[in-house]
Image: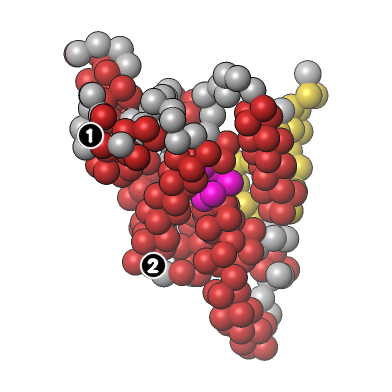
């Protein structure tokens, strides 16, 4: 098992938006837990999760809130403690630096748009599915895509656990995000060939990541220019090398 938990990549500003997004996800998860406990287990997912068939054919929607509203609600919902913990950990590791480059307001728009496009990608590959989709994974994948463009060589502290062997290694971001891409591509293609595709929206992740890469590319030249100026006057640390 490998588990990244901290990047070595300083920022120039506090990540207010990233913290607010994490807080919103936590609040939504607590709300889900309360609803499921007081009404019935699974009620929140069944009624507020994104259903591709309901989004494409709203007149046929037989349960839950407006399909358009589920596009936004589903981005802040999670299926369990491990689901939300994994997504928020990745957002905390990579989101602060992407927010630092883009600025708070633009980063918020970027995050929400990435989540929406990830959902649309899932709908594109599963147009007849009536299974509700939830999770911040698509939006977080957009953040990973931007980080890959901005800081491919930034070092990430990673816990490596093989049986009884446990150690911490420093891996470049491109290896961890590249592994994420490879797993999603392989599993996504396998799901297309399977009669029962399972419970992970692999193509939503890829849609979000592709959006993140595409949006980040125009920022890269501006980021490089800022770093060159910083190197001239302040000797920029090696971790910021592109």
| Residue nearest the observer in this picture, 210 or 178 | 210
Task: Please identify the dominant SS of the magenta region.
Answer: helix
**Residue at left offset 54%, top offset 58%:** 212
For the view shown, which residue lies furthest in the top direction? 40
| Residue nearest the observer in this picture, 13 or 128 | 128
- Determine crowd level at label 2: few under 14, some 14-19, many 20+ residues with C-alpha closer than 10 A: few
Q: How far across and how far down the image is residue 182, in percent?
A: 72, 42
- Which residue matches tag 2? 106
- When asked about the image quadrant of residue 34, the answer is top left
Is residue 238 visible to the viewer in this orientation of the structure? yes
Earlier sequence position, callout 2 versus callout 1: 1
The kind of secondary structure element at disc 2 is helix
Magenta-span inclusion, residue 120: no
- When asked about the image quadrant of residue 32, the answer is top left
Question: Above or below — where is 15 with respect to 60?
Answer: below
Q: Magenta region: which residues? A: 204-208
**Residue at left offset 46%, top offset 62%:** 99
Q: How far across and how far down the image is residue 147, in percent?
A: 59, 59
**Residue at left offset 25%, top offset 42%:** 69
Question: Above or below — where is 86 with respect to 97?
Answer: above
Gap between marks 2 and 1 measured at Cα? 35 Å
Question: Above or below — where is 168 with respect to 109?
Answer: above
Is residue 85 visible to the viewer in this orientation of the structure? no
Is 176 on the left-hand or right-hand side of 66?
A: right
Magenta-span inclusion, residue 206: yes
**Residue at left offset 54%, top offset 49%:** 207
- Which residue matches tag 1? 59
């Amino acid at each position: 098992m490998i588990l990244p938990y901290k990047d070595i990549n300083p920022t120039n500003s506090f990540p207010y938006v990233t913290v607010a997004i994490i807080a919103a996800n936590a609040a939504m998860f607590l709300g889900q837990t309360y609803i499921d406990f007081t009404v019935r287990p699974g009620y929140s997912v069944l009624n507020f999760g994104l259903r591709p068939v309901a989004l494409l054919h709203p007149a046929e929607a037989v349960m839950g809130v407006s399909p358009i509203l589920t596009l936004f609600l589903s981005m802040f919902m999670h299926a369990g403690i491990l689901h939300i913990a994994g997504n928020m950990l990745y957002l905390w590791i990579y989101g602060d630096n992407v927010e630092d480059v883009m600025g708070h307001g633009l980063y918020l728009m970027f995050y929400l748009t990435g989540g929406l496009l990830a959902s649309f990608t899932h709908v594109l590959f599963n147009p007849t599915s009536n299974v509700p989709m939830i999770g911040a994974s698509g939006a977080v994948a957009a953040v990973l895509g931007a980080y890959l463009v901005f800081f491919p060589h930034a070092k990430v502290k990673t816990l490596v656990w093989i049986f009884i062997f446990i150690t911490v290694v420093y891996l470049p971001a491109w290896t961890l995000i590249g592994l994420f891409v490879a797993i999603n591509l392989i599993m996504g293609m396998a799901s297309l060939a399977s009669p029962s595709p399972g419970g992970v929206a692999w193509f939503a992740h890829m849609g979000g990541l592709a959006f993140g890469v595409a949006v980040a590319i125009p920022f890269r030249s501006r980021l490089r220019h800022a770093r060159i100026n910083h190197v001239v006057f302040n000797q920029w640390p090696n971790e910021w090398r592109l």
